[in-house]
Image: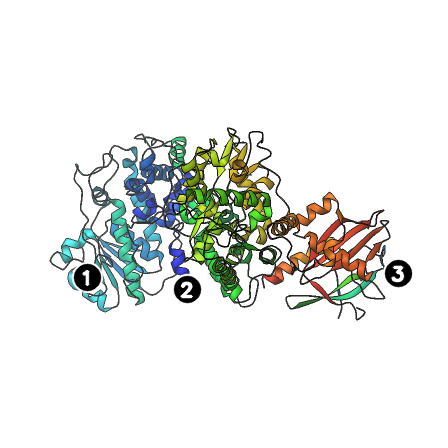
């Protein structure tokens, strides 16, 4: 990922965009933080937020005309926040004048002509930047206030003069020199400019100096004379145009913002830097932040009485703030929530991770933990796809040889096993020489429920010809992995190689139509081999039900239980498939419910993207979360992906594969349809046994290795540890066989009869503790493994 | 080079079956991802067979493996 790609990724996540209120405030007050503190009753912090942004805060906080209120998202749920009332309450309760530490002077000078609020605000900002300010004014306090829109009838009106005087005093202490009396003549401006001063002609003085000039630039307020800036008096809405609670006059916030704009330009002029760069979002702008109102309860505003909010009223009004933020994806994804941030931050972490030359790549696990299920892209208003970002990062890690070896090794070994001669079946239907269709059950259904693969294949042989207008027949079978694990692992070459092997089998079998049982296989094959026709088992079954009614399904049990349907995440973009599944369930009289996150918003079971390999604790959390949410909708779940089923069962939700339901009989119970999920070793054995049943042992089959035939027993503890630590029955057998053959093991003299043996078949060292029973059969009691290996044992090895 | 002590306790109750000798703490060199470590581990004083206990393999060793994989 290069810098520009990073920027593109970052720009699609709007979480860091300001909320509407802040964007609508010409001074960009952090209204969200202000409301948060006010709702907590922390007035000191709330006042701190105002003082950080507002010039002359003790005055401006009392007369703010809240342009943010119209922009407030609360308008769609009860009414916009009454921020002006909250600001007044805050100022009244804790609004001390800002401290005026003497600023170190930078040797830069500015002159302000006109002491209206814009002039005073400019003086405030310039002085805080260490610029020496001389302010020439004719205006009295009353004149300044008279020109501003103020809250009509509010008790606070009586105190405004005092607060203005207070802030003028603060300005003096900050070092601003006030020149009261008639404003100087125009020639004086030329002299100041000639001596390097920046000059601001405030709105009140504009008619005096600039009436016949070209209007100043809207962004910089620059005039035809470099160094001279001016602001036209803003429009004064009449009585009829002003909001109800305000008297006519200039918007105080708008006036202050003009002063701020002038001060920014003057500082840039004095520093001799660009006047225009990076000012796109100065003043009011529109924000891209998305905030969902889905869970927001409408609440009416708390009305501000003429004497102002009480502390309790202010807290209640502030508590109505929605605290606008997006976080749509994070709310819906435990993976995104796991790392404490949001996609924009994650994109940067991934970029940094890739840029590290020496040191720890701390984002590796994060990158390898994404399920790549696409839910984030579906819920994000900008379509940010964390899966695509992580896939790019994984491919880059593989390419640069920086992918942690342990991350996906077990899954890739399993894929290699599923694609080995002991598991692959590629054949026509019995006694047929060609295939119109080719059933592709996927490597997980063959591992999880080999019996269902056989039943389904037989069923397809009978019923696919029955819905074919051309009366074609012949349903072959291809037991092979689609290559999804290699794709998820970022191993593009391996993925392509796997697809090519599938393609070769397809060619050899006469280019039939693939019929996949697994939704992920359908997606992977369609994307990887777009020239091969791929249909899904579920759509074909729905067609059969549509044409032939219930007859093809025999007399399945009419399921009326509390069934909840779980859509596998591989179906997110396959609406026809999801609809076919529902049609099929209805046709078969199966009653089911749907969870809140369903169809294109379904959740991953915790297998997608190989998260279960790279981050087993997170994968377990994901599965438990989904299982719990399904359990609130029904006692049993039903799904149509073998891996989803097995993971949900392991997490404690009895889950049936749809095929379990279809091949049931009136005597079948729901428990019969939700068998336990087989462990890793059993899955391998299931594939091998299925392959042998479907192919028969051929003459050229390799003899089973010696270690495969030794008898072994396991304690329950050992069997559980093997699952947890991903140690296979074959790994243990190799260790035991090696110990028996070599006579090399360790005796534990403290635990009579216990032996400890180890072996490193390739890169992982496996340890096994066992005893030998009366018949000479090892009973395995414990297993563990590590990847670090001994290269020198003091010269004795 | 001195070796790091990574295990507490005694493993003298373990006996190398082919040699019949109790395991003793020995300096052992371990390797992963190109990094090498000298550690003290129980080994047979005769044939050098090394024992890596479960708590080390699944604990500190797994942590170091993970760290090295992220280097």
Q: How many marks?
A: 3
* Image coordinates for residue A665, horizontal then vertical, percent: 55, 32
A225 to the left or right of A614: left
Chain name for mark 2: A
The reply to whether the C-beta atoms of the residues labelled 3 and 2 are less than 8 Å apart is no
| Nearer-N-terminus badge (1/2) | 2
State whether residue A16 is above or below residue A499: above
The residue indicated by pointer 2 is A3
Between the C-alphas of marks 3 and 2, the distance is: 63 Å
Q: Dividing the image into 4 quarters, which one contains the C terminus of chain A?
A: bottom right
What residue did someone put label 1 on? A223
SS at badge 2 = helix
Secondary structure, magenta segment, majority class: loop
Looking at the rendered image, the disc whose residue lies closer to the viewer, 3 or 2, is 3
The crowding category of the residue bearing disc 3, from other C-alpha atoms within 10 Å (few below 14, some 14 to 19, many at least 20), is: few
**Is A695 part of what is drawn in magenta?**
yes
3 and 1 marks in contact (CB < 8 Å): no
Can the viewer see residue B30?
Answer: yes
Q: Nearer the viewer, mark 1 or mark 2?
A: 2
Residue at image position (52%, 44%) is A641
Q: Is residue A117 magenta?
A: no
Q: Residue furthest left?
A: A212
Q: Residue B18's quadrant in the figure?
A: bottom right
Q: CA distance from mark 1 to mark 2?
A: 38 Å
Please state the chain letter of the residue tagged with numbered disc 3 in the rendered image.
B
Chain bearing tag 1 is: A
Q: Position of residue A660 (x, y in %)?
A: 55, 38
Q: Which is more toward the observer, A241 or A519?
A: A519
Q: Which residue is mark 3?
A: B20
Give the residues drawn in magenta, as a range: A694-699
| Frontmost residue, A110 versus A388 | A388
A100 vs A670, nearest the viewer:
A670
């Amino acid at each position: 990922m290069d810098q520009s790609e990073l920027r593109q990724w970052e720009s699609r996540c709007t979480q860091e965009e300001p909320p509407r209120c802040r964007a609508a405030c010409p001074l960009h007050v952090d209204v969200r933080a202000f409301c948060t503190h006010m709702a907590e009753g922390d007035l000191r912090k709330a006042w701190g937020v105002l003082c950080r942004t507002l010039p002359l805060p003790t005055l401006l906080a009392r007369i703010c005309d809240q342009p943010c209120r119209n922009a407030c998202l609360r308008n769609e749920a009860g009414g916009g926040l009454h921020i002006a009332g909250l600001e007044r309450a805050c100022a009244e309760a804790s609004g001390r004048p800002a401290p005026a530490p003497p600023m170190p002077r930078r040797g830069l000078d500015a002159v302000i002509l006109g002491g209206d609020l814009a002039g005073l605000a400019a003086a405030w900002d310039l002085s805080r930047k260490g610029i020496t300010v001389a302010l020439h004014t004719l205006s009295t306090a009353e004149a300044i206030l008279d020109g501003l829109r103020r809250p009509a009838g509010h008790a606070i009106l009586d105190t405004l003069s005092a607060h203005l005087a207070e802030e003028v005093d603060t300005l003096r202490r900050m070092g601003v020199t006030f020149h009261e009396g008639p404003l100087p003549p125009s020639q004086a401006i030329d002299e100041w400019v000639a001596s390097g001063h920046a000059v601001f002609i405030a709105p009140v003085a504009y008619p005096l100096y600039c009436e016949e000039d070209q209007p100043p630039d809207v962004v910089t307020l620059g005039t035809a004379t470099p160094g001279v800036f001016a602001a036209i008096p803003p429009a004064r809405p009449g009585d009829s145009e002003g909001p109800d609670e305000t008297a006519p006059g200039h918007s105080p916030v708008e006036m202050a913002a003009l002063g701020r704009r002038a001060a920014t330009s003057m500082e840039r002029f004095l520093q001799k830097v660009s006047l225009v760069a990076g000012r796109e979002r100065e003043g009011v702008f529109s924000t891209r932040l998305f905030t969902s109102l889905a869970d927001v309860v409408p609440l009416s505003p708390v009305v501000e009485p003429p004497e102002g909010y009480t502390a309790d009223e202010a807290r209640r009004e502030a508590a109505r703030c929605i605290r606008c933020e997006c976080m749509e994806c994070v709310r819906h994804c435990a993976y995104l929530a796991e790392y404490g941030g949001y996609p924009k931050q994650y994109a940067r972490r991934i970029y940094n991770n890739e840029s590290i030359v020496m040191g720890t790549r701390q984002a590796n696990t994060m990158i390898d933990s994404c399920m790549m299920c696409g839910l984030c892209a579906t819920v994000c208003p900008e379509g940010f796809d964390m899966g695509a970002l992580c896939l790019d990062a994984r491919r880059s890690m593989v390419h640069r040889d920086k992918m942690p070896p342990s991350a996906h090794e077990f899954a890739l070994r399993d894929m290699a096993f599923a694609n080995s001669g002991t598991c692959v079946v590629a054949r026509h239907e019995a006694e047929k020489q060609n295939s119109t269709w080719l059933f592709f059950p996927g490597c997980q259904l063959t591992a999880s429920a080999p019996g269902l693969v056989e039943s389904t294949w037989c069923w397809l042989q009978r019923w696919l010809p029955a819905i074919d207008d051309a009366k074609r027949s012949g349903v072959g079978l291809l037991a092979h992995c689609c290559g999804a694990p290699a794709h998820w692992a970022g191993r593009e070459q391996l993925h392509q190689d796997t697809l090519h092997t599938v393609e070769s089998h397809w060619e050899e079998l006469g280019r039939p139509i693939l019929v996949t049982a697994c939704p992920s296989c359908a997606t992977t094959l369609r994307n990887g081999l777009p020239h091969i026709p791929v249909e899904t088992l579920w759509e074909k079954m729905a067609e059969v039900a549509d044409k032939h009614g219930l007859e093809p399904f025999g007399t399945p049990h009419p399921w009326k239980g509390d069934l909840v349907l779980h859509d596998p995440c591989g179906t997110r973009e396959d609406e026809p498939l999801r609809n076919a599944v529902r049609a099929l369930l209805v046709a078969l009289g199966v009653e089911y419910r749907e969870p809140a996150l369903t169809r294109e918003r379904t959740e991953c079971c915790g297998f997608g993207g190989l998260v279960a390999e790279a981050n087993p604790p997170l994968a377990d959390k994901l599965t438990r979360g989904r299982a719990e949410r399904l359990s609130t909708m029904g006692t049993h779940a039903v799904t149509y992906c073998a891996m989803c089923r097995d993971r949900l069962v392991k997490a404690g939700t009895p889950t049936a594969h749809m095929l379990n339901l279809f091949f049931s009989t009136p005597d079948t119970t729901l428990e019969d349809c939700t068998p336990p999920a087989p462990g890793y070793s059993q899955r391998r054995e299931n594939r091998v046994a299925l392959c042998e049943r479907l192919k028969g042992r051929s003459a050229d089959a390799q003899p089973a290795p010696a270690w495969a035939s030794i008898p072994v027993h396991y304690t329950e503890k050992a069997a559980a540890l093997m699952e947890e630590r991903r140690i296979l029955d074959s790994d243990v057998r190799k260790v035991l066989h090696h110990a028996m053959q070599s006579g090399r093991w360790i005796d534990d003299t403290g635990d009579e009869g216990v032996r400890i043996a180890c072996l490193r078949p390739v890169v992982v060292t496996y340890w096994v503790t066992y005893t030998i029973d009366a018949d000479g059969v090892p009973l395995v009691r414990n297993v563990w493994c590590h990847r670090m290996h001994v290269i020198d044992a003091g010269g004795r090895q | 080079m001195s070796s790091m002590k990574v295990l507490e306790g005694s493993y003298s109750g373990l006996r190398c079956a082919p040699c019949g000798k109790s395991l003793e703490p020995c300096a052992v060199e371990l390797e992963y991802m190109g990094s090498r470590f000298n550690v003290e581990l129980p080994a047979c004083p005769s044939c050098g067979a090394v024992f890596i206990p479960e708590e080390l393999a699944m604990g500190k060793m797994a942590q170091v493996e993970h760290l090295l994989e992220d280097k």
